[in-house]
Amino acid sequence: MSEKNIQTQLLAEFQEVESGINGHAAEPFNQRRLKAIESFKKLGFPTTKHEEWKYSNVRKLTQKEYNFHPKSDITAEDLNSFHLPELNGIVLYFVNGIYHPELSDLESAKGKVEILTFQEAQKQNPELLNTHYGIYTDEENEAFSAMNTAMANDGIIVHVPANVTVEQPIILRMVSDTREENVGSVLRNLIVVGENAEVKLAESFRTYGEHSGFVNTLTEISVAESARVDYYKVQDESNEAYHIGTTNVLQKDKSYFYAATVTLNGGFIRNNLNLKLDGEYIDSYMYGLYVPNGNQHIDNHTVADHTKPNSVSNELYKGILMDEATGVFNGKIFVREDAQKTNAYQNCRNVVTSDKAVMNTKPQLEIWADDVKCSHGTTTGKLNDEAIFYMQSRGIPKQEAIRLQLLAFAEDVVSQIKIEQIREFLAEKIKEKLG
Amino acid sequence: MLTVSNLHARVEEKEILRGINLEIKPGEVHAIMGPNGSGKSTLASVLAGREDFEVTDGSVEFQGKDLLDLAPEERAAEGIFLAFQYPVEIPGVTTINFLKTALNQIRKYRGEESLDAAQFLKLMKEKSKLVKIDDQLLRRSLNEGFSGGEKKRNEIFQMAMLEPTLGILDETDSGLDIDALRIVADGVNQLKDQNRSFIVVTHYQRLLDYIVPDFVHVLYKGRIVKSGTKELALELEEKGYDWIKAEADAAESVA
Ligand SMILES: Nc1ncnc2c1ncn2[C@@H]1O[C@H](COP(=O)(O)OP(=O)(O)OP(=O)(O)O)[C@@H](O)[C@H]1O
Ligand SMILES: [Mg+2]
């Protein structure tokens, strides 16, 4: 299938969604969708000529055919295998892009967190939806965001009202069921965290099956004044998975936002994490870890956009690239003219364990204010042979010595993961993968 | 215990060891001295199994086995220990965890049970007393930010933990203050018994006052050009290497 065809297919899909809307076309949510489809038509899929896609070629993705409305007979039992046994929380299941409340566990959300589908929200709380939906998403310039807004229909809003502290994490489990055929999913969720509220979120992406899966996911997180949000994105997808994901975060005064993006596996992955620090005295943290092997390709693009004074952003991404894996890191820091006394730090460190693995890094600092502290650094190195020989000379086999060295390298990020069950799960998975 | 015969080794195109012969019996201490760049560390590294050096000729037999056939970790498990001239810093791995892994890997190789946490800690306490190394140091990343002397002391501590049959000390004395030197030497002397041997690479007679060698060898341009007893070290201290160099160079030009 050619690129034109998948675009035509998507436009047809759009028409189908559109015709189901009957009578609600005038609502802002749907108006936005109309604009987005126009923009998507205009933009088309990016090529490597596009500055933001220089090292990530989406052609392999766009040349395949996907079913965007597959049936899935996945059972609660199948899904059980994706649970972390000791991790309790509010669990929401999405299968092939569609939210499944009947598979989800919303018990501990009751009375604390409002969870509505977009369809429900349009009826029950349109103000919430219209105030926050899409306000920090750039459909005009980003093809995948435009496609997402145009096609997303089945997402949810998670609303944590002001002053509420949600103890248990809210876990969004996204499963691609590709056992029967190539599957395309469009996921769109909106998280609204009220003033002085506190919540931990985790998004987990898994593939269940051998066929190709294309996931276009977009999460918007609105962090009100003095709110505190921890956000985890964990990817353990198949080598046939194509994942284009964007997380757009809008932070207000004195808020705290922490993100940890851990990519264990995935054939072709692009993560965009965009933070807009739209207030003073904000703290932002971005951690990332990726461990591709084989032919996996993992691309992380991040933005910390400081628009007002006195905020801090801190970023640490680490990668271990094996075999013929490829990786991309592009970290942008913007410090706008008003954002005096900004502190912004960025660091990306990588180890390649084979001559064929390639990492492309590009830090990008644009600073218009004069009284700021910013630093950035990227390194890509090989394994330390001296250290490996030293360990071997003490009786540790070479393979184990390499593993110890890589685990120690990853530890800086792993140790930043605050939820113990997730931390231990990931540490174990990474250990396995480093073999 | 160890028989080195006609050992040749090179790195890239450069021949560094050019026919080493050395015989070490159980319980013996051999000192190796010689000018900078003569190949002492190279010899130590080749014995420990560093791959950067290519052995082009000769053989090494250790306790009846062909040492050159074994991977470095197998040599360690067979009882070889190298205290590095420049110990390597390993961020993110504590000395404790490192040694626990090492010790249990060696035990596994030998078909022995792993030590559990309690047994390991007990052993560690005992051995850290032996070389008077601070517990706090062992909890830090291996050698990271250690002072020169702390690194050397940590090498001897590791040796005490792993209880090798052949300990090779590559300039463990350089960088040590006088008290540390005595502690390190005491540590070695306590490990010494009729089955355990040592190769001590040093530039200074001082160490040999504490660790008394049975033999002293002078390495020059990749060969052992002179061997003697501990008196040879005293003579070198007094006269330097020039006379030995002259002898050796003359012998070589004749040959
Ligand atoms: N990896 C290497 N690549 C190139 N040359 C090397 C390498 N390792 C050692 N050499 C060279 O081999 C020679 C012997 O080095 P070696 O470290 O064995 O000397 P040494 O006797 O231990 O000296 P010192 O007393 O200074 O410690 C030196 O000329 C050194 O530069
Ligand atoms: Mg040396």
Image: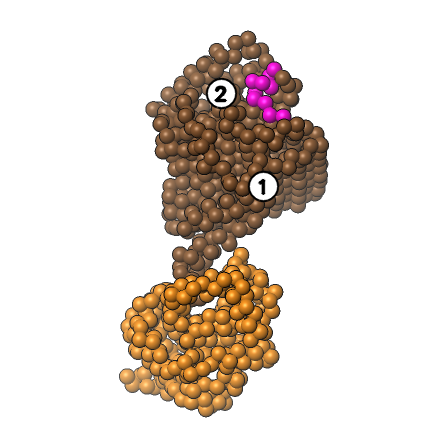
Chain colours: A brown, B orange
Q: Is residue A68 above or below residue B100?
A: above
Q: Name the residue under label 1.
A: A286
Most distant residue in the top direction: A23
Q: In this view, does B92 lie above or below A180?
A: below
Is the residue at mark 2 in contact range of ligand 1, meaning its CB lies under 8 Å from it?
Answer: no
Query: Quadrant of residue A207 in the image?
Result: top left
Amino acid, disc 2: Met
Q: Is mark 1 on a helix, strand or loop?
A: strand
Residue B93 pos. (x, y %): 52, 58
Nearest the viewer among A407 and A318 is A407
Quarter of the image with the N terminus of chain B in it: bottom left
Query: Which residue corresponds to the image point at 47% horizontal and 81% vertical from the top-left?
Result: B192
Characterize the magenta stretch by its predominant secondary structure: helix
Q: Residues within 10 Å of mark 1 (few under 14, many from 20)?
A: many
Residue A422 is tagged as none
Nearest the viewer among B8 and B92 is B92
Residue A52 pos. (x, y %): 49, 34
Does A279 sit left or right of A139 as displayed?
right
Q: Is residue B103 magenta?
A: no
Indicate the chain on which mark 1 is placed: A
Quarter of the image with the C terminus of chain B in it: bottom left
Amino acid, disc 1: Met
Q: Which of marks 2 and 1 is nearer the N terminus?
A: 2
Indicate the chain on which mark 2 is placed: A
Extent of the magenta region: A114-123
Q: Name the residue under label 2.
A: A151
Q: Is residue B229 above or below residue A27?
A: below
Query: Which residue corresponds to the image point at 47% horizontal and 56% vertical from the top-left?
Result: A405
Query: Which residue corresponds to the image point at 49% horizontal and 70% vertical from the top-left?
Result: B161
Residue B123 pos. (x, y %): 52, 69
Report whether mark 2 lies on the same chain as mark 1. yes
